[in-house]
Image (tube, helix red, strand yellow):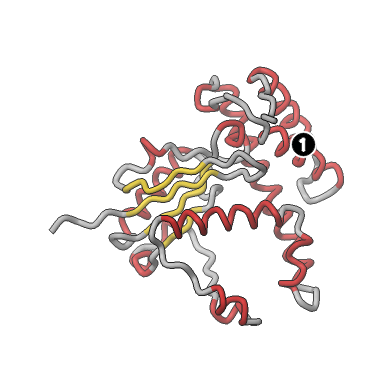
Amino acid sequence: MESQMIPVDLLISYVFQIHTNISKLESLRPSKQVNALFTQLVNLCTIPSTIDVRVLPQDLQLKRESLINLCGQAEGLMELEFSTFITKTPKPLNNLNLFPYYGNYLKLAKMEYNILAENGSMSPKKDIVASDEELEKRMKFVTKDVMELKECLGEYDCIFLAALVGLSRDEKVKILGHLRKYMKEGGLLLVRSANGARAFLYPIVEVEHDLVGFEVLCVFHPNDEVINSVVLVRKPFTSS
């Protein structure tokens, strides 16, 4: 049975009523009220709809930008609280499923893995990951503005650009141009985007305009509880 479409006007009204309620909160840290509002928002934005947020008037665009910022802050606080909690458990990896959106994150990761595999990317050796209890020894974390990273970007076969890196259109385009300049030729860039009502939660990357200079390999828009769209592009080889 097909899901029923929600009328665009009704969707907009509901979304911005939730935005008003979220804006009145004293804190975006996880709580019963915060969790309820964002769960309501996510559920609303995953109902099938024909909306194209790019054509909304300027006043609603500003509200949408505000909502995306609030969502990003709340998501960061939720992940911070959970990561702080889980590091205090005896076996953190065994408790990942306690995270409220674990299933959603897992689906997104599998979706991205499949897209990479289907487009010729080398598959990671899952047996190596599964047999190693000290994953952190093979991982490196660098906290830095992406615009400050230059030649080192050419060391990677694949780069992921998270949805909340570059909240405004101008910022996103600037970052994409920077990555294109310093990535290796033939390197893959996996960009998280949003489509339809999901674009009330995350910024949109417009494939035709924002990814100039890249070869587009795949564009995938989910139709389940997963929020992010995935765009896979490649930096072309320079003609010799």
The answer to whether 123 is drawn above or below residue 64 in the figure is below
Secondary structure at badge 1 equals helix
The answer to whether residue 188 is left or right of residue 64 is left
From the top left corner, tell me how far across and down residue 232 is, in percent: 42, 50
- Residue type (three-letter) at the residue carrying disc 1: Gln
The tally of labels here is 1
| Residue at the (53%, 26%) spot, across then down | 52
From the top left corner, tell me how far across and down residue 111 is, in percent: 55, 53
| Residue at the (48%, 58%) spot, across then down | 145
The answer to whether 155 is drawn above or below residue 159 in the figure is below
The answer to whether 40 is drawn above or below residue 53 in the figure is below
The quadrant where residue 20 appears? top right
Q: Which of 186 and 71 is in front in this view?
A: 186
Q: How crowded is mark 1: few (under 14 residues within 10 Å), some or many (20 or more)?
A: some
The answer to whether residue 117 is left or right of residue 32 is left
Q: Residue furthest left?
A: 240
| Residue at the (77%, 36%) spot, across then down | 40
Q: Which residue lies furthest to the front in this view?
A: 1
From the top left corner, tell me how far across and down residue 148 is, in percent: 42, 60
The quadrant where residue 236 appears? bottom left
* Quadrant position of the N terminus in the picture: top right
The answer to whether 90 is drawn above or below residue 7 in the figure is below
* Quadrant position of the C terminus in the picture: bottom left
Q: Nearer the viewer, residue 147 or 103?
A: 103
From the top left corner, tell me how far across and down residue 87 is, in percent: 75, 72
Residue occupied by mark 1: 40
